[in-house]
Structure formats: structure tokens, C-alpha cells
Image (cartoon, rainbow, N blue to C red):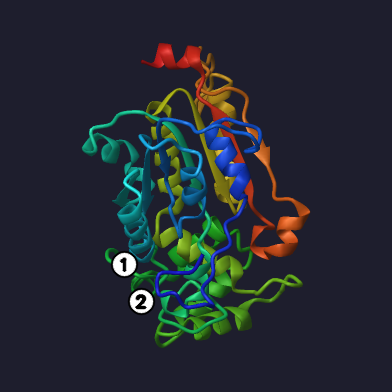
Amino acid sequence: MTATDRTPALIHETVLLHETVAGVLGVSDLSGVSLQAGVYVDATFGRGGHSRLLLDYLTADSTLIVFDKDPQAIVVADELAKTDSRVVVVHDSFASLNESLAKLGMSQVDGIMADLGVSSPQLDDGARGFSFMKDGVVDMRMDTSRGQSVGQWLKVVDEETLANVLYDYGEERHSRRIARAIKAMENYDSTLELAETIKEAHPAWQKGKHPATQSFQAMRIFINNELGDVKDFLNQTLTALKSGGQLAIISFHSLEDRIIKQFLNNHSKGRHEGDDKLPIPPKRPKYFDKPYRIAPSDDEVRANVRARSAYLRGARRNQTAFESFN
């Protein structure tokens, strides 16, 4: 599956493809599965790998609502919608889930899936500014049609705030030293120059890992409000999913995976975030059944090295909790 400009080099290998589609359909695997009817959401369309496979298992009267912030991804989604009337495209963050469903005249869906990773076309296209291996303007916005780029932000942010971002969102232990070096740069017009500055400032490199990896991750997460959007999105799934509806989410780094794990664990045990700090936590409904976690197979990791850090987590919306919530 090629990127929107059809450049052969910009190929996106969909991670945990069959496992995610099986998860959102509520089956252990896809072999022998009959066509399913319902309304489903792909909260991160990307280049449509998960969506295209899911459509193969949906009836002709089903609906698949696809979200993405990236204008290039939306071009691909619009092309798919022209050939498949079941597809409805939303150019927005998945944090707008409930609001967008309401605009479409819907309130609840049968399944929601999301792939929180940056797509290969985004990483491999130097012009997008995500890569520290290919030169481009320091941008890193998922949605290039709105908001502040990382380069614009670096011009105005103070050193202490930058250091905190590198530490909090990239878990970079040498954040202060790196922040000092970044703020000493004359301009932020080149991702390769920014990566080289970080490399020179970094006192301890991890073998096999570029020294700018964590800093680039931190700035990308911050400028796109990725963790905030994930939290908002997860909370909205409590009301967006029908009774028995399935949630399946892929994450690629520990910060997002931790948020998803805690959310599913809490809501499968009748807890909310912060309940552990209360002297007598209130009794709450168990909104999800027991969560699961799936890692890529060794074969998938060998075929696609970017799958090595991925985890799929999911759970089924609990019937009893659904009735009490509503």
C-alpha cells in the first residue's frame, strides 16, 4: 500500500493487521468468520491497512467511520470512500469521537480500533519533519493544515520548558543538556541539523538507537498533544461503544501503552483514575470485560522492524456495566 503521492519508497507496512481486525470483530482469529453487520470506527486511518481488511468482513449495509488528522491520509481515505459507500471520512483527531459521531447522527458503534503509531510515509517523507535520518523542515505536525510546528515552537519556548518536555514525553535522562544545546541553535530549518545537535550534546548513546530518537519523539508527542488526545479518546469509548462492543488499540511506546493498560485495567475492575487516593473508593461498574494484550509474532518483527515495540490491547464492553452506565 503506497502513500498518497504514490512514491514507491513511501510504503506503510500495517502492524498487527489480522490481530487488530479480529479484535474489533470480537473473534479469536479471522478464519471462517462470516460477514458482520454494524457500525465500526477506525480512529487512525493512516493509509487504510486495517480499514481495508475490516471492510472485507463487513456486510454491504455496514458503516465504517474513519478518522485522521493528517491531510495526506485523508486524501487516501477519500479515494477509498469514492469506491466504497460504506466508508465515512472524518478529518479530525479521534479525540473528537463523540462530537463527530453526533454530527453524523450516531451515538454508539459496534467496534473501535486505533493504531497510535506514526505511519511509515510520515516517517520516511523528510518534508514532514518527523525523521532524523532524512532532511526536512522541523515540523512534526500530524495535521499540517493547523497549529504550530515544532520549529516555530522551538523559537519561542524557554530552555527549562523544553527540558521538561524532553524528559516527560521522551523519558530522556539528559534532557537539560540537550535542551541547552537546542536553544543555542541559530535556526530550526533542518531536521538533520537538529538531530546532529542532539547527537553532539548526548553524553551516552544506546547501542543501535539514534541519540535523537527520544528527543524527536518527545517534541512530536508534545506538539500534537498525543497523550492528551489518547486520554480523551479512551474516556469517550465508554459511551461510544454499544453493549458488547469491542475496543482494539495498538501503541508503540511505553507512555501510550501505560495509559491504555491503566484505562482498561481500571475499567475492567470498577475503578477510575485516582480512586486509589481516596480513603473509601466508591463502587463503580466494570465497564469492560477482562482486557488482553497481543505482541507481534517473531515473523512479523523480522519482516517489519518497526513492529518490534508494538502492542495490541483490547477488551469487550461489559453488558451489565453498559446498562448501569446508561
Question: Mark 1 or mark 2: which is in front?
Answer: 1
Q: Position of residue 175 (x, y in %)?
A: 57, 67
Q: Count neighbours of disc 1 (C-alpha within 10 A) and say few if under 14, some if 14 to 19, many if 20 or more.
A: some
Q: Count neighbours of disc 2 (C-alpha within 10 A) and say few if under 14, some if 14 to 19, many if 20 or more.
A: some
Q: Locate residue 78: give its quadrant.
A: bottom left
Dot 1 falls on a residue whose secondary structure is loop
- Report the side of 281 relative to 156 (left or right): right
Of 205 and 301, nearer the camera is: 301
Question: At label 1, which amino acid type do we have?
Answer: Gln
Please give the name of the residue rendered at 40% of the width and 75% of the height, measured from the top-left corner.
5
- Is residue 273 visible in the rendered structure shown here? no
Proximity of marks 1 and 2: CB atoms separated by less than 8 Å: no
Q: Position of residue 149 (x, y in %)?
A: 35, 70
Of 1 and 104, nearer the camera is: 1
Mark on residue 155?
A: 2
Give the answer, above or below, for where 306 lies relative to 85: below
- Report the side of 103 relative to 272 (left or right): left
Marks 1/2: CA–CA distance: 11 Å
- Report the side of 313 relative to 3 (left or right): right
Of 48 and 82, nearer the camera is: 82
Q: Position of residue 73 (x, y in %)?
A: 39, 61
Please give the name of the residue rendered at 45% of the width and 70% of the height, measured from the top-left corner.
159
Dot 2 falls on a residue whose secondary structure is helix
Please give the name of the residue rendered at 51% of the width and 86% of the height, measured from the top-left corner.
193
Q: Position of residue 233 (x, y in %)?
A: 41, 40
- Disc 1: which residue: 148
Mark on residue 319?
A: none
Please give the name of the residue rendered at 44% of the width and 41% of the height, measured from the top-left corner.
231
Question: At label 2, which amino acid type do we have?
Answer: Lys
Give the answer, above or below, for where 53 lies relative to 129: above
